[in-house]
Amino acid sequence: MKFDNNNHSVFLLHYHLVLVVKYRRNVLNDAICQRLREIFEYIAPNYNVSVQQWNHDVDHIHVLFKAHPNTELSKFINAYKSASSRLIKKEYPELRKELWKEMFWSRSFCLLTTGGVTIDIIRNYIETQGERNEHKTQSV
């Protein structure tokens, strides 16, 4: 596993983002999704974010991305949603008839943290900290 770092920390922060089209309208195709990804990748470096995986269905997208600890995720997501909505409606005017009140994305989003191990493994690791030292001192 390769960690990221900056001057004062080492980290590996992965997130799974799901964005849904307003009223789950079936407007996403491969061309629109590719353009949405290009917009994401254009904005991402300004927030220390990088795309790891991208996919879509007809009414939502899934993005796996990495970020730095200082990234303000909600600001990044809102900046992306705003810019992508504006650009997609401009570049694909036929979408306007499918959308109500010009809104492209739903106001909400789903953002999940991801990791290399399960929560149960982390809990067990934390619970057992210091136990090895206790066994060593007891056996001496």
Image (cartoon, rainbow, N blue to C red):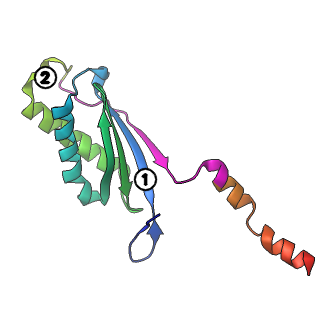
Q: How far is disc 1 from disc 2 in space, using C-alphas?
A: 34 Å
Query: Quarter of the image holding residue 135?
Result: bottom right
**Viewer-nearest residue: 103 or 52:** 52
SS at badge 2? helix
Looking at the rendered image, the disc whose residue lies closer to the viewer, 1 or 2, is: 1
Amino acid type, label 2: Arg
Outermost residue, bottom side: 140
Amino acid type, label 1: His
Label 2 environment density (alpha carbons within 10 Å; few <14, some 14–19, many ≥20): some
The residue shown at (74%, 59%) is: 127
Residue 38 left/right relative to 72: left
The residue range painted magenta reads 102-121
Q: Position of residue 23 (x, y in %)?
A: 30, 20
How would you classify the magenta stretch by its main secondary structure? loop
The residue shown at (69%, 60%) is: 126
Residue 18 is one of the magenta-drawn residues: no
Using the image, tell me which numbered label, if any, was put on residue 14.
1
Q: Indicate whether 44 appears above or below 91.
A: below
Residue 62 left/right relative to 116: left
**Viewer-nearest residue: 87 or 127:** 127
Q: Which residue is mark 2?
A: 96
Q: Position of residue 84 (x, y in %)?
A: 19, 40
Residue 103 is one of the magenta-drawn residues: yes
The residue shown at (91%, 82%) is: 140
The residue shown at (31%, 22%) is: 24
Q: Indicate whether 72 appears above or below 88.
A: below
Using the image, tell me which numbered label, if any, was put on residue 6.
none
Q: Position of residue 16 (x, y in %)?
A: 41, 44
Outermost residue, front side: 1
SS at badge 1? strand
